[in-house]
Structures are given as C-alpha cells and as structure tokens.
Image (cartoon, rainbow, N blue to C red):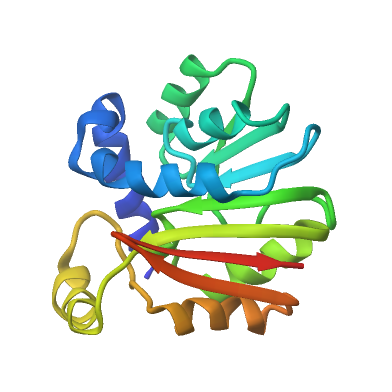
Amino acid sequence: MKNKTEASRLAYNKIASEYDVSKEGRYTRFHIGELSDTIDLRDGDVVLDVACGNGTLLRELSKRADIQAHGIDVAEEMIRAAKSRYQDMHFEARSCCPLAWNDGSVDIITVCCAFHHFENPQEFADECRRVLKKGGAVYVAEPNFGAALRFLANTIWFPFAKSGDVKVYGAKTLAAFFYAAGFQAVRAYKKGAGLFLKAEK
C-alpha cells in the first residue's frame, strides 16, 4: 500500500500552486471553518497540523491565539507554498508516521480531510497519543459519507484512484482508532459535509 502515500504526494504536488481554487481546496473550506471555530486554543500552545497543505488551517488558528504553529505534509510543493505564505510558521515535508516529535511535546494535533489517505491509521493514532501532552487533544475532520457511499468509495473508487485515497470511515470506526490508542475521551459528530472528531489524552 506504500504506493498510496506516493500517489498522494504526486497528486498534491501537481495541484499545489492552484490548491485554493481546486476541487479539493474548495471542499476543505467547510471543514477548516468548523475546526477553526471549535478547537480549544491558548496562547503558547504547540499546534501540529498533519497533512497541512498550504497552511490555511494554521493561519486561521493563529488568528485566535498566539500559537507555535507547525505543519507537515508529504507533498513538497504544498510545503513550499506554505513556507512562502506564512514565514512565521514552521513547515516540513514528511510523512505522518512516525511523528518527529518527542513524547508529550505537543498541545494540539489537527488533521483536516487527510485521515482517509493514511496507510496505517492505527499507528497514526498511537503516535498522536505519544507526542501529545497530558490534556492535549487531536482534532480530525473527514468527509461525511453515508454507509452506501463509503462502501462504493472503499471498494470501487479508491482502489483505482490516483489521488492516494485509502479508506473513508464512519464515526464509530474513526473513534475506535483513538480509543484503541488509549485516549481518555473521544467524541465524533457529523455536521453538514463533515465528520469531526476530538480525542483527548
């Protein structure tokens, strides 16, 4: 399945320069807005946005608090765009697993419309728990597909997709990854086009 990560890298490098007006960029706007409105932030928080794209979510979060903003993404061109836009933030081209952070060093982790690209979602959830501080939280935004659409996507569309999609999940399955990782409180809810999750360590 390693070809899925490479497919994601190639696909998002290709659209990096026009991401905001692309189909993917337009789709994520609602999810970014919901995360921006609901994430609990304090000045000084270390925030890691995984699959950060061109940095838009971190920009919105930085409007609400004086955060230490960090973003990672497998697509080098996305990181190049993020660095050129937001020079006061820290961006790096790298995979989501393993996370290059020390144990208990991050306050908030975010993943916006990218969890379904992860080849090993359980390993990622485990990594989130490792690097988060006590009381820290991970926030995930995903497409809100019904059961029938999830089945079609996972069995017919994604196996042949060239954009690196691996699998979309329902709320219970998404939450189960983080319960299995040892998070103390996990809440998943649906709103409009989005499925949202908050897991607290």
- Residue 86 lies, in percent from the top left, at 54, 18
Please tell me whether residue 27 is drawn above or below residue 68 in the rendered image: below
Give the image location of residue 26, x and y in percent.
Answer: 25, 39
Front residue (pair 172, 10): 172
Q: Quadrant of residue 171?
A: bottom left
Can see residue 110? yes
Q: Can you see residue 2?
A: no
Nearer the observer, 129 or 44: 44
Report whether 104 appears left or right of 194: right
The x, y position of residue 70, in whole percent, is: 64, 35
Up/down of 43 relative to 39, above or below: above
The residue depicted at 30 percent of the width and 53 percent of the height is 7
Relative to residue 72, is residue 77 depicted above or below? Answer: above
Compared across the picture, whether 8 is left or right of 105 comes to left
Name the spot of residue 200 as percent of width and height, x first. Answer: 72, 66
The quarter in which the C terminus is drawn is bottom right
